Image (cartoon, rainbow, N blue to C red):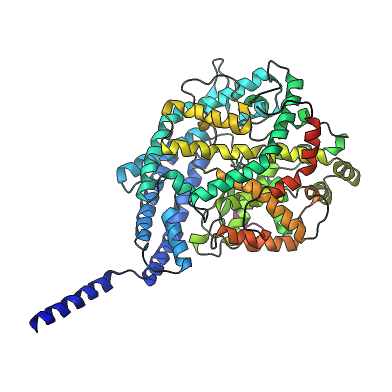
Amino acid sequence: MNKLFIYTFAILLLQGCSNETKLTEEDAILFLDEMEEFSTEEGPIASSAYWISSNFITYDSQKVVADYSKRYSLLSVENARRAAEFDDVDVTKDTRRKLNFVKSGFVMPSPLDEGLATEIANLKAELSAMYGSGRHCFEDGTCYDLEGFEQIIDNSRNPEDLLMAWSGWREIGKPMKEKYLRMVEIGEMGSKDLGFEGLSDLWFSKYDMSSDEFLSDVDRVWEEVKPLYDALHCHVRGELNEFYGDEVVKNDGMIPAHILGNMWAQSWSNIYDLVYEPSSVDASINLTQIIQEENLSEVDMVRVAEDFFVSLGFERLADTFWERSLFVKPRDRDVTCHASAWNLDSEEDLRIKMCIQKNEEDFVTIHHELGHIFYYQAYNHLPSIYESGANDGFHEAVGDLLSLSITPAYLKELGYINEEQYLDAISDPISLLMKQALEGIVVIPWTLILDKWRSQVFSGDVEADQLNNLWWELRESYQGVKAPIARDYDAFDPGAKYHIPGNTPYTRYYLARIMQYQFHESLCNDIGFDGPLHECTIYNNPEAGEKLKSMLALGSSVPWQDAFEELTGVRELSGESIINYYSPLKEWLDEKNEGRQCGW
Ligand code: X8Z
Ligand code: ZN
């Protein structure tokens, strides 16, 4: 009797205990409410610290941002640990999705350790500031910042000047190497503490499929696009050889990186005139010239892009956007000029930060940045955990999608070209497609390289003294582009690209550059356009606008494949739309390349 009593009591006690500690869906919901408060309270102030630190790069602003970033990341890691406590709890799909976001919302995480958190926060702030305030002075006393060097790389046709600017800017990478490696070392520890196999696993686990599946999809689509890139490479190399001669660029092998009209050879549109002769002057539209003739200011350029979004049914931007954004490079202080779009308080405080130059490239970049801004606007009604793109590639693709609609018909509608110029422009599709391809196709292999390099650095597969060689091996193999001079033993060329010291994942741009054509093609079909895809514009088309807006309004509340299907009717990335879009150019290139020895 007694024994039975004790036994029953023990059971009750155990059940009582376990009932007390067993977490439930309700606890998860309470926890997620707390997370909502955390982001609305802590988010805006941390964002302001970041805004100040990249708008006024000073000793003190870096101190402040490092301190905020340390505190924010320690709190976020604690939150991730709490989210992991729900791993075995039976919860709804939606709750699970939110919990997973709390666990994986990091890029370069710190372990839960005050000392390491301080160290990594300082390193991040330092590396970003080194890039943002980067300049190099030569022995003769002349100094250049990135914009100064770019003036040369983008415009000069003098191989010596080009080489000077190309190698000059890469000097800023050298002192980053040790700091970068230490940051990665701490970041790896942080990602493992969060339950990931490492930083790569963390970065590539955010695509609603396994990282292996995702990466193999990425490579599959590249195989579809590669023949087009190869044909373009072959033609451009041939034309450059004719212009510069064998001493600068041979008619076989790789193209040296300094003569392609861009600091990273990621866009070749600045050498358009060297590689294509339009059928008449007006057959090639020169947006830089239009911007100058129309006397557009930097702010006017942003207004034109805003008007495009408004024509699709988006709301105009708030006054605070115009008051608080940075459009023009300040003369008296260091700022990070690399264009970016900011969502400071998940409500109305949206801004861009960009040192606008009055040219075609920046006109397109403004559309890119506003794409981020209108995405923020479209999903700001959601719980903050879902306030992001369906995946990070979607966020990059919105403005890029609109750029495909900057067609001769659109420019005529704005009154920037007349009927005659319009007819000339559409009579030479190769001119238009060549201009687009020199940016849109050329960038694709480049968008693969950065994260392929980082993956190997993160895993520690590559020795410190081989980091730069690995970088060049990837550039050679994917882009067919080589360093124009031997690299110094201490060179750290990846550091001379914003996204490396700034820790911005880059595969997102790859996704965007593929998806933008899938979006464009399906919207153009929806609105009943039946001409060639490069002539289709969605400007002023509320039907296309509505479709786009409703996809954007989903934020990240559903798997990206669902959002993708809503707009395109399919659930997979594919190179088919890009191939369709450029098919007249591919035919033309194949003819031009007959008799040429292609490849590298
Ligand atoms: O970094 C950017 C945007 C900001 S998200 C200006 N882009 C990449 C780059 O400049 O390298 C857009 C194209 C690729
Ligand atoms: Zn972007």
Whether residue 512 is visible here, answered yes or no, is yes
Which region shows up in magenta? 315-322
Q: Position of residue 234 (x, y in %)?
A: 72, 29
Q: Is residue 289 above or below residue 575?
A: above
- Identified at 40% across, 38% down, the residue is 183
The residue furthest right is 420
- Identified at 79% across, 29% down, the residue is 594
Q: Where is residue 270 in the image (x, y as percent from the top left)?
A: 71, 32
Viewer-nearest residue: 442 or 168: 442
Q: Position of residue 343 (x, y in %)?
A: 54, 54
The answer to whether residue 36 is magenta is no
The answer to whether residue 321 is magenta is yes
| Position of the C terminus by quadrant | top right
Viewer-nearest residue: 360 or 460: 460
Asked where in the image residue 167 lies, by quadrant, the reply is top right
Viewer-nearest residue: 21 or 273: 21
Viewer-nearest residue: 534 or 324: 534
The residue furthest bottom is 1
Q: In this view, does 534 lie above or below 96?
A: above
The residue furthest left is 2
Q: In this view, does 150 lie above or below 587?
A: above
Could you tell me how many numbered marks the image carries? 0
Quarter holding ligand 1: top right
- Identified at 37% across, 67% down, the residue is 89
Asked where in the image residue 245 lies, by quadrant, the reply is top right
